[in-house]
Amino acid sequence: MATPIWHRRPALAELEATSRATATEQLGIEFTEVGDDFLAARMPVDSRTVQPYGLLHGGASVLLAETVGSAAAHCCVDDSAVLTVGIVRIRALGEGRRRKGCSSSGRYRRASC
């Protein structure tokens, strides 16, 4: 039997509610199961998630993985705890704003690539 990983065990209804009006809902991602040491979700392969060639788009796969990983991580830590992640912070873009970017020598820069 697995050791529970949850600080606060997620409820499927709660996860679905927090997904409303987000990319998660737009792509049809549904949380399906919560176990002692996992969170599962599914995503349809349809016109919302395929490349022009009819194959699952890699970005959609990443969005699914990030959605499940973030939701699970949020429920594994104490909300009052401080968590520091060693990444370079790039200013988040709000709805309707776009920016193109390329990586050059490990640094982020604006570009038209």
Image (cartoon, grey):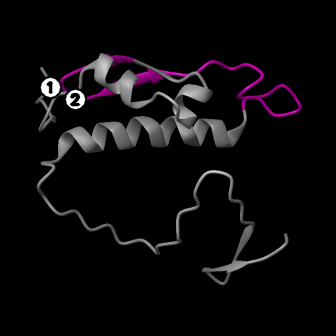
Residue at the (73%, 72%) spot, across then down: 102
Residue at the (75%, 66%) spot, across then down: 100
Disc 2 target residue: 37
Q: Residues within 10 Å of mark 2 (few under 14, many from 20)?
A: some
Q: Which quarter of the figure has residue 33?
A: top left
Left-right relation of 62 to 33: right
Residue at the (32%, 27%) spot, across then down: 39
Left-right relation of 19 to 62: left
104 w.r.t. 64: above or below: below
Residue type (three-letter) at the residue carrying disc 2 = Asp
Q: Is residue 43 magenta?
A: yes
**Res. 43 in view:** yes
- The foreground one among 74 and 37 is 74
Looking at the picture, how far across and down is residue 78, in whole percent? 12, 48
- The foreground one among 71 and 19 is 19
Q: CA distance from mark 2 to mark 1?
A: 6 Å
39 w.r.t. 106: above or below: above
Asked whether the residues under the numbered discs 2 and 1 touch, taking CB atoms below 8 Å apart as contact, a structural biologist would say: yes
Task: Report the quarter where the N terminus lies.
Answer: top left
Q: Residues within 10 Å of mark 1 (few under 14, many from 20)?
A: few
Residue type (three-letter) at the residue carrying disc 1 = Ala
Residue at the (84%, 25%) spot, across then down: 54
Q: Secondary structure of the magenta portion, mostly?
A: loop
Residues shaded magenta: 32-56
Give the secondary structure at mark 1: loop
Looking at the picture, how far across and down is residue 27, in whole percent? 62, 27
Disc 1 target residue: 2
**Mark 2 or 1, which is nearer the eye?**
2
